[in-house]
Image (spheres, rainbow, N blue to C red):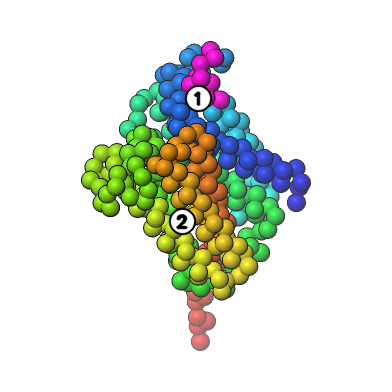
Amino acid sequence: MSRALRNLSLLTTAAMFLVVLMGAWVTNTGSADGCGAHWPLCHGTFMPDWDYEAIVEFSHRVVAGIAGLMTTILFLWVWRKLPKRRDLFWAALTGLAFVVWQGALGALAVLWPQPKAVLALHFGFSVMCFAGVLMVSILLYRPLGELRDLTVSPALRRWIWTVIGYTYVVMYLGAYVRHQDAALACTGWPLCNDQLLPPLTGPVGVNFIHRVGAALSVVIVIRLWSMTRAASRGLRLGGNLALLLVLLQVVSGALFPLGYYNLLTQMLHTSLITAFWGVLSYLALQIWPIRQPTQVQLPEASA
């Protein structure tokens, strides 16, 4: 396997992780409109004035563009040089497809104002880009045939996919909380404004629903961790990391209403959920379904 290709995949994974963080930086600093209604230029130029919001937004665009170019090169390299590695092809294509969707959604958000429910999708697309290139990096070191665990129980297989689907919904809710400026709508923790069940309307309702979703994610990940205790080494590693990261994620989220709501804690919160999604991607590779060959019915020989 080409060392240069492996290095490119690792650099692209790191670049995509940085794109996710910078996207959160843009949102958390209210810099989404820093370049006005111009795209891909910023206020009609490649060199915007030294305005904080413009620099934040334009820096994110530049890094996202570079990461998108790297993802494209990675896909073309895999497609042209390793045509028999279908696992790598589909992982690289996943990263490229979501890079395109992410860029399109970002451009639309600038040129035509979008509802906040739509803007929250941007984060989900970003982590899917990251997952795609991360899977390429993993598969370049361990092909799917070696990584996949054929002995995993159907119950564990179903539960891992359940955790993945549920986590994506909770991540969307978290992004929606940020876009609604509802991160501090609930003061105190674990109670919301000293209430066990606050009104489920407005920013308070959005924040509280996300809190409940995050609490339930701990429960389902604990069950995942418990189910991986008797599984293979790779699944045990994934279960351990998933539990550690989801607990750290809840702690980082609890810092907000306890008086530690700042850019550093917000970036920490984003880093942890992105890393958690990466671990779930690693688990998904180990339980990836095997395509069964088509059975061809041969005609019976005539007597």
Front-lying residue, 97 or 205:
205
> Residue 67, percent across and down?
60, 34
- In this view, 233 is above or below 93: below
Q: Quadrant of residue 285?
A: bottom right
Q: Amino acid at mark 2?
A: Ile
Dot 2 or dot 1, earlier in sequence: 1
Whether residue 203 is visible, yes or no, is yes
Q: Position of residue 284 (x, y in %)?
A: 53, 59
Q: Residue at x 60, y 48 (%)?
A: 134
Q: Distance of mark 2 from mark 1, alpha carbons? A: 30 Å
Which range is magenta? 49-59
* Main secondary structure type of the part rendered in magenta: helix
* 210 to 117, vertically: above or below: below
**Secondary element type, mark 2:** helix
Circle 2 residue = 164
Q: Secondary structure at mark 1?
A: helix
* Depth check, front residue: 142 or 123: 123
What is the x, y in percent for residue 169? 39, 50
Residue depicted at 75% across the width and 43% down the height = 4
Label 2 crowd bin: few (<14), some (14–19), many (20+), radius 10 Å: some
Residue 185 vertical position relative to residue 49 in the rendered view, above or below: below
Instruction: Find residue 57 and name its label.
Output: 1
